[in-house]
């Protein structure tokens, strides 16, 4: 993962370039829309990202979690359930989007990615995630 603070302009003039960009090995840059000050909140229902493509264009992408994936995550919790707005969902969505653009060398065609399966790493992370 690399950080590029100049690729995307920020909407928040008080904190220019205060976002982190995840850069995939094939040159795609992923930024959380909430860090640009352009989105109210992210949740299990929708996490929003801007993807900068190697060709120079940008795409808006929404990542959602299928109910089966949400249930699997909640089953991993030993104590309390993760809230629908926990930062876990945003972090997990970002990881899945990065994997998608790297493996497919492009964005989801309709600007929407549905996470319907989770890795062992995702489930272990969910089990230990602190509420946020």
Image: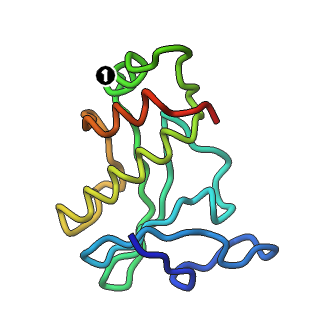
Q: Is residue 80 left or right of residue 50?
A: right
In the rendered image, the vertical position of residue 61 relative to residue 92, given as above or below: below
The quadrant of the rendering that contains the N terminus is: bottom left
How many residues crowd around disc 1 within 10 Å: few (fewer than 14), some, or many (20 or more)?
A: few
Q: Which residue sits at x=57%, y=43%? A: 42
Q: Residue furthest right?
A: 14
Colour scheme: rainbow
Q: Quadrant of residue 86?
A: top right
Residue in the picture at 20% in, 69% down: 105
Identify which residue is drawn at 23% across, 65% down.
Answer: 102
x, y percent for residue 116: 27, 33
Which residue lies under the disc numbered 1?
68
Q: Is residue 106 left or right of residue 48?
A: left
Q: How many marks?
A: 1
Task: Give the image location of residue 58, x and y in percent.
Answer: 42, 74
| Residue 84, image x, y percentages | 56, 28
Horizontal and vertical percent position of residue 80: 56, 16
Occupied quadrant, residue 17 = bottom right
- Which quadrant: the C terminus? top right
> Is residue 126 placed above or below 24 in the rendered structure?
above
Classify residue 9 by image quadrant. bottom right
Q: Nearer the viewer, residue 26 or 113?
A: 26
Q: Is residue 55 above or below residue 87?
A: below
Helix, strand or loop for disc 1: helix
Task: Residue at 43%, 27% (x, y): give it.
Answer: 127
| Nearest the eye: 33 or 72 | 72
């Amino acid at each position: 993962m690399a950080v590029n603070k100049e690729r995307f302009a920020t909407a928040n003039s008080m904190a220019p370039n205060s976002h982190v960009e995840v850069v995939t090995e094939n040159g795609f840059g992923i930024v959380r829309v909430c860090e640009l000050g352009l989105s109210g909140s992210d949740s299990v229902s929708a996490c929003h990202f801007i993807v900068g493509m190697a060709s120079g264009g940008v795409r808006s992408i929404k990542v959602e979690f299928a109910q089966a994936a949400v249930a699997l995550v909640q089953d991993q919790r030993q104590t309390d359930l993760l809230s629908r707005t926990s930062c876990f969902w945003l972090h997990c969505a970002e990881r899945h989007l990065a994997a998608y653009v790297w493996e497919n060398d492009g964005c989801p065609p309709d600007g929407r990615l549905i996470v319907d399966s989770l890795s062992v790493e995702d489930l272990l992370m969910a089990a230990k995630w602190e509420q946020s």
